[in-house]
């Protein structure tokens, strides 16, 4: 059965003066209609870049060097910029991390919402305004008419993020890519926003790619998840399974280090020794091997491929 | 924009405006004090009034009448009072009230500055935006190189070279004076060169010369501001929303670039006036700068001080207005009160 | 442990400098200009400031390659009969002296004020910055013209001639110190909160020692950047003042005054009196600006992307 979105062997490089660096090394992902997928990893693992590459918005000097992205059967990775514009903000919407920085400070909310609609279809200002109001109500914003006339700095962080979610809903997209949507918000607001996203995806039957380093959020919200490490996916599959029975030692370490799962008050914090390598210093073989307690000789020479570990989970590890 | 004063933010704004206004008044008082000190120490109003052929006794009497033997503070207060009524004394050279002399010379300078400002806006905006959008393009490099050259040539040299090229060698454009002017308001005050072909021909070289020193500055400013704006998150988000490049560049990025540029423009008006002195000298342009130099050369103290006080007050006014305007559009400024 | 010289040789600074041909060319040009200026008393064909050397009969002779030119005066003579080449060399010398002198004065005053304001903060900061603001709002050129004019009126022309160079240094120096003050204050405020300052305080170093020995060296990069701009500005200011007749006196012409005297003769055909000094001035300031541009790029990579 064809998926809504497929990433085949995606490779993204950054062209530096001293040569190319590989940021994403052969990533495969699938997403179905209405599904929520979590993309997890530390900073620098490549998850944001993956998100951006779907709509071809990687900051220079990055570029897609290999692989295909297929959306609704079309190979959008080969689209011209003009054709890509029909997808961006229209069929695939994106939510960024910091709502203060995302909205243009010199234009009103209404201006920024109406222009999104007018960019993608022929619609009068009045009609666009009505749709904007409708979506603002959907994200539970009080007195939406007032909000349209306000400037971003007049609103709180949580409110702004709701507005950004509303903007992403304007065109009834098939997919929302949320890049760390709650990192810049207070903890209490975080929960509200995540609940909102979940509720909307269910009611509108939208697919959601949730990019985050917060395993807690992923375990509560997503149906499937993929764990990235040093530019590769090292484990992916059903979220419930992975959280309860992680296969890859890295995932295992991540889950263990969340207070409340394995760790109880009074016991030592669990850490994964060492740090994730930078893109220029990736060790040969399995990138995780210097920090892995299961390491064997083969791990330092041969890069493991994703293989079926059972129960709907795939992992890239020689030892499991 | 309706101004409502009920939120805390608005209260900050009012406090900010009051603070800046008080500062402005203070500065103007200091300037007037300095101006007056110079005037009272250097000038000789008795001689200005009656010449050299008077006895010392008559001198002393006239000095008394003029109030020149009063204590400094009394004289100063008198000075300020007069100034507030528009009385700056009488010009030695023109034998007319200083204010009248200045106002008669003002239109020439204002038209010069206006013409130069127009040229600057029309050229620096497109060039600055272009070199920000396509920084590696050959034309952009050319613009940047040219602008480095531009700031290296003093304004009077540009003026002279233009005269040499266009007047002496090619004979296309006139090299001095304002040409034919028309009295707009029919009261002898505003003689405009904008309304006659001859006047316009005379305006071209001076305006271009004056613009030439500021043009490179603004091109660079617009370029660097816009390049910074283009790297922001909200521009990236605009791309993610699927807006057209034209809209992103010319609406989103442009408005954010324009704001700081406009503030700089306001603050630079002072520098423009300084450069008009040089330009007017070269082109024999009968504006305020020309008058200022005349006053210096012929030691017309009253006129000099009047010019300084007026011009300084205009600067302070413009600076204050620009500061307040900036406070409106940048909320973080109001609270700390600093730039 | 490498010596400082060794570290400098291997630094990115030097590497980037070697890469940029424009920067190298302008640096070499500036060195040449400075050498020319310093050795002017020995290399110039004659001393243009000595009235005995000037013969009014020699005035307005065109450059030697033109018709009517003479070999003794390679670039022609000015309206008083002075040899252009010599006068230009001496003028360059004057410009450089005033430029460097004025900027040193600016830097001295500005750094002192800025350091105090930035580090001591509070009332000192407020007062010093108010003074700087007031001065900033008034264009320095007008200030310089005013002070020069008043000096001439009060002290008379001959006294003025004797004191011209130091006076110009003082005027331009005092006019522009707020630039330095603001820059260093900004960088001091940045550094103030960094940990090494706290560490120095904990050790017990006095405020002034911390300011001069620790904070100041870290602010050097911004200072270097504006110094080039300021030197270029100072040279142009002196030229402007001389052009207006308020700078160097007629008997000791600088490049600006040469341009001025030449201006009247441009219509009668003696173009060289204005054009040659003009070109020299432009080249000199251009070299400084190009070097300054490169310096700015190298020390502040985030400013110029692309």
Image: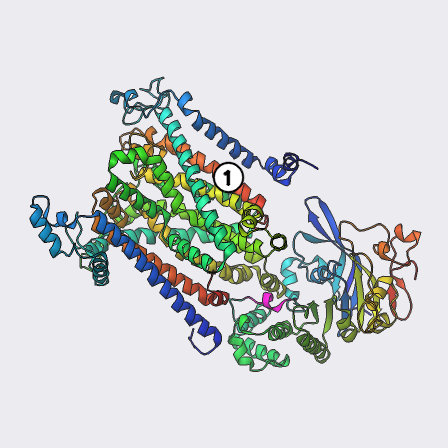
Q: Position of residue B263 (x, y in %)?
A: 43, 59
Query: What secondary structure is marked by label 1?
Result: helix
Q: Determine which quarter of the picture holds residue A156.
A: bottom right
Q: Position of residue A32 (x, y in %)?
A: 78, 71
Given residues B215 and B43, the one toward you in this image is B43
* Residue ID at (30%, 33%): C162
Q: Quadrant of the N terminus of chain C?
A: top right
Q: Chain of mark 1?
A: C
Magenta span includes A111: no
B113 over C6 or under it: above or below: below
Q: Which residue is mark 1?
A: C290
Q: Determine which quarter of the picture holds residue A155.
A: bottom right
Q: Position of residue A241 (x, y in %)?
A: 86, 72
Residue B157 appears in view: no
What segment is highlighted magenta in the picture? A97-104
B73 over C285 or under it: above or below: below
Q: Position of residue A120 (x, y in %)?
A: 60, 68
* Residue ID at (23%, 52%): B105
Q: Residues within 10 Å of mark 1 (few under 14, many from 20)?
A: many
* Residue ID at (46%, 30%): C33
């Amino acid at each position: 059965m064809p998926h809504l979105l497929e990433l085949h062997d995606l490779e993204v490089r950054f062209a530096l003066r001293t040569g190319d660096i590989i940021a994403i090394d052969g990533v495969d992902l699938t997403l179905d209609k209405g599904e929520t997928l979590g993309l997890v990893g530390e900073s620098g693992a490549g998850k944001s870049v993956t998100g951006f590459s779907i709509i071809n918005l990687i900051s220079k000097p990055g570029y897609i060097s290999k692989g295909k992205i297929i959306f609704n059967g079309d190979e959008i990775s080969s689209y011209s910029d003009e054709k890509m514009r029909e997808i961006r903000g229209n069929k695939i919407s994106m939510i960024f991390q910091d709502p203060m920085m995302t909205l243009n400070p010199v234009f009103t909310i209404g201006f920024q919402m109406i222009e999104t609609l007018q960019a993608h279809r022929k619609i009068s200002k009045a009609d666009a305004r009505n749709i904007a109001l409708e979506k603002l109500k959907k994200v539970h914003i009080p007195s939406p008419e007032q909000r349209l006339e306000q400037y971003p700095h007049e609103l709180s962080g949580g409110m702004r993020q709701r507005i950004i979610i509303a903007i992403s809903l304007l065109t009834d997209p098939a997919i929302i890519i949320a890049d760390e949507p709650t990192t810049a918000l207070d903890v209490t607001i975080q929960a509200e926003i995540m609940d909102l996203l979940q509720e909307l995806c269910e009611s509108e039957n939208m697919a959601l790619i949730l990019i985050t380093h917060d395993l807690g959020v992923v375990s509560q919200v997503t149906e499937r998840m993929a764990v990235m490490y040093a530019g590769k996916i090292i484990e992916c599959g059903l979220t419930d399974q992975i959280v309860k029975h992680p296969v890859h030692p890295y995932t295992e370490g991540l889950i263990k280090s969340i207070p409340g799962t394995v760790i109880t008050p009074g016991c030592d914090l669990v850490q994964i020794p060492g740090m994730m390598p930078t893109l220029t210093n990736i060790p040969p073989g399995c990138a995780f091997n210097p920090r892995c307690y299961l390491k064997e000789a083969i791990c330092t020479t041969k890069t493991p491929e994703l293989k079926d570990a059972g129960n709907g989970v795939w992992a890239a590890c020689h030892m499991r | 924009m309706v101004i409502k004063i009920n939120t805390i933010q608005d209260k900050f704004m009012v406090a900010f405006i009051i603070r800046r206004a008080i500062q402005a008044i203070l500065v103007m008082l200091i300037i007037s004090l300095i101006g007056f000190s110079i005037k009272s120490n250097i000038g000789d109003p008795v001689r200005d009034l009656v010449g050299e052929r008077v006895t010392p006794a008559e001198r002393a009497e006239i000095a008394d009448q003029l109030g020149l033997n009063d204590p400094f503070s009394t004289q100063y207060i008198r000075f300020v009072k007069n100034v507030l009524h528009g009385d700056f004394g009488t010009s030695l050279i023109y034998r007319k009230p200083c204010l009248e002399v200045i106002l008669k010379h003002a239109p020439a300078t204002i038209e010069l500055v206006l013409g130069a400002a127009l040229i600057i806006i029309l050229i620096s905006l497109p060039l600055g935006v272009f070199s920000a959008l396509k920084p590696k393009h050959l034309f952009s490099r050319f613009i940047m190189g040219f602008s480095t050259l531009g700031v290296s040539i003093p304004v009077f040299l540009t003026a002279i070279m233009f005269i040499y090229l266009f007047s002496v060698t090619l004979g296309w454009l006139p090299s001095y004076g304002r040409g034919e002017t028309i009295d707009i308001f029919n009261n002898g005050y505003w003689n405009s060169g904008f309304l006659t072909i001859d006047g316009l021909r005379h305006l071209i070289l001076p305006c271009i010369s004056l613009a030439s020193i500021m043009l490179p500055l603004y091109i660079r400013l617009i370029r660097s501001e816009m390049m910074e704006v283009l790297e922001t998150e909200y521009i990236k988000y605009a791309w993610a929303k699927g807006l057209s490049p034209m809209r992103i560049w010319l609406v989103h990025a442009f408005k954010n670039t324009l704001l700081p540029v406009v503030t700089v423009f306001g603050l630079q008006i002072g520098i423009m006036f300084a450069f008009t002195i040089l330009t007017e000298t070269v082109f024999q342009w009968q504006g305020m700068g020309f008058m200022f130099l005349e006053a210096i050369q012929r030691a017309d103290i009253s006129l000099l001080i009047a010019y300084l006080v007026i011009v300084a007050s205009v600067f302070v006014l413009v600076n204050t207005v620009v500061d307040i305007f900036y406070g409106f559009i940048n909320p973080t400024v109001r609270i700390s009160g600093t730039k | 442990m490498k010596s400082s010289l060794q570290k400098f040789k291997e630094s990115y600074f030097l590497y980037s400098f070697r890469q940029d041909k424009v920067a190298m060319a302008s640096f070499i040009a500036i060195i040449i200009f400075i050498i020319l200026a310093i050795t002017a008393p020995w290399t110039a064909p004659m001393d243009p400031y000595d009235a005995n050397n000037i013969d009014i009969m020699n005035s307005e002779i065109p450059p030697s390659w033109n018709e009517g030119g003479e070999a003794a005066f390679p670039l022609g003579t000015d309206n008083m009969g002075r040899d252009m080449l010599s006068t230009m060399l001496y003028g360059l010398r004057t410009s450089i002296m005033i430029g460097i002198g004025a900027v040193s004065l600016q830097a001295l005053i500005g750094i002192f004020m800025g350091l105090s304001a930035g580090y001591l903060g509070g009332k000192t900061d407020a007062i010093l910055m108010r003074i700087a603001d007031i001065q900033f709002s008034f264009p320095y050129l007008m200030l310089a013209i005013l002070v020069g004019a008043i000096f001439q009126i009060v002290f008379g022309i001959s006294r003025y001639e004797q004191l011209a160079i130091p006076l110009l240094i003082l005027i331009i120096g005092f006019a522009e110190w707020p630039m330095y003050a603001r820059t260093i204050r900004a960088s001091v405020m940045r550094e103030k909160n960094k940990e090494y300052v706290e560490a120095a305080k904990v050790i017990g170093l006095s405020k002034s020692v911390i300011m001069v020995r620790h904070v100041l060296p870290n602010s050097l990069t911004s200072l270097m950047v504006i110094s080039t701009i300021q030197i270029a500005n100072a040279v142009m200011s002196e030229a402007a003042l001389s052009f207006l007749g308020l700078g160097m006196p007629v008997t000791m012409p600088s490049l600006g005054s040469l341009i001025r005297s030449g201006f009247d003769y441009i219509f009668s055909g003696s173009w060289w009196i204005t054009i040659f000094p003009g070109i020299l001035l432009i080249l000199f300031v251009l070299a400084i600006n190009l070097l300054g541009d490169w310096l700015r790029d190298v020390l502040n990579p985030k400013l110029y992307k692309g």
